[in-house]
Structures are given as structure tokens and as C-alpha cells.
Image (cartoon, rainbow, N blue to C red):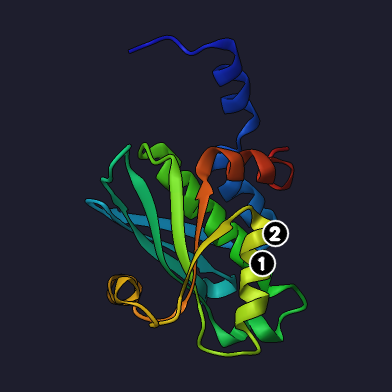
Amino acid sequence: MTPLLPDAIQRSASMPTMSEIMDASRTQGLRLRLQSLGPFFRVRAEGEGGVELGRAEGVVRPWVGGKVLHLDSMRLSRDTLRMDRSIFGFGLFIGAAAVRHGFDRGCRRAELLAIDDSPLFHPRLVRFYTRMGFKAVHEVDGSSIGDLAHMLVWGGRGTRMDADIEQLLIKWRKRFKP
């Protein structure tokens, strides 16, 4: 194992740990549970009484240049709409746990598809992920043969987005570090 350089130690110390993410979620009345089986994972957010409020699912997969965190889906329950909180707040907690899991498994890049299943919601979803630190890399609209592979992998049309996991965690540190 190679020793960490001072810059790497400083960056690592500025990123929230999984424990810090879990602790911060509990202060908001959320209980996050991470389940994994091989490369597959699920992060579940539960409210009072164990009611599921949302979940994220994905896979850690090998790729050229290293492992990639493939964020397959994130769903929030309708119960979150009735709560006096932003649904994007729930999304940040669930996403942070998924991203930290990817980092802990050796991933350096995260990828997702901001699904385009509603002309009203899609631009908001792209804005949310952009604010979170993702960058649009491809519009999957079915207009080319290359889109067919994206549509098979992701299950629909939308905006493919990537992010550097380390940069995401550093950006989000203020939300999760005490």
C-alpha cells in the first residue's frame, strides 16, 4: 500500500464519512440503511415507524480506468410530498450514502440518467443534479444508434450525467460534517 500524500490526507479528511452521513440523517429524522450484495447496493431512507420514504439502487462496476458507481434509480415516496421539507433534502441524504458507498468500494466516478419522463420535472431534475455536482455528458433521446445502448442500460430517455465522487463528497462536506 502506498502512503497517502499530504494533499490526499487533507482531501480525505474533508470528505464526510459514512458514519457522519448516517448521523446527519438521524438528526433530520431519517434512518438510512445500506444493503449490498456483491456489486449491487440499495440505500433505503426510513422515517418514523420504519416507513420507507425513499430508496436508491445501483451497482459498482468495473470499467476502463477503474470502478464506476452506476446510480440506477432513486425514488421518493408520495409521503415525502406531504412533509414540511424539501424532497431534494431527502434526495441529498440518500444520494450521499450511495456516493460514499461507491467511494468506499473504490469508485472514482458516478454516473446516472436524469430520466425524461415529464417535460415539467426533467429540467428540475437536471438542475438538481447539476447543483449537486454532476455534469451533463449526453442527451439520450433515441435519435441515434448510440442511444440504443444507453436506453437499454438506463431504461429510458434523459440526460446522462457524470461526477467525480471525491469532488461530490468535498462539495457536500458542510452538510454532513459536524
Q: Nearer the viewer, residue 11 or 118?
A: 118
**SS assignment at label 1:** helix
The percent coordinates of residue 94 (x first, y second) are 54, 61
The percent coordinates of residue 12 (x first, y second) are 56, 26
The quadrant of the picture occupied by the C terminus is top right
The percent coordinates of residue 99 (x first, y second) are 49, 50
The residue shown at (36%, 61%) is 58
Which residue does the numbered mark 2 point to in the structure image? Answer: 131
Which residue does the numbered mark 1 point to in the structure image? Answer: 128
Give amino acid for label 2.
Answer: Arg
Q: Nearer the viewer, residue 107 or 78?
A: 107
Report whether 85 appears left or right of 11: right
The residue shown at (67%, 77%) is 124
Spatial distance from mark 1 to mark 2, Cα to Cα? 5 Å
Mark 1 vs 2: CB contact within 8 A: yes
Q: How many marks?
A: 2
Report whether 103 appears left or right of 147: right
- Quarter of the figure with residue 84: bottom right
**SS assignment at label 2:** helix
The residue shown at (67%, 85%) is 81
Graded by Cα atoms within 10 Å as few (under 14), some (14 to 19) or many (20 or more), the crowding at tag 2 reads: few
Q: Residue furthest right?
A: 84
The percent coordinates of residue 150 (x first, y second) are 34, 71
Report whether 9 appears left or right of 63: right
The quadrant of the picture occupied by the N terminus is top left
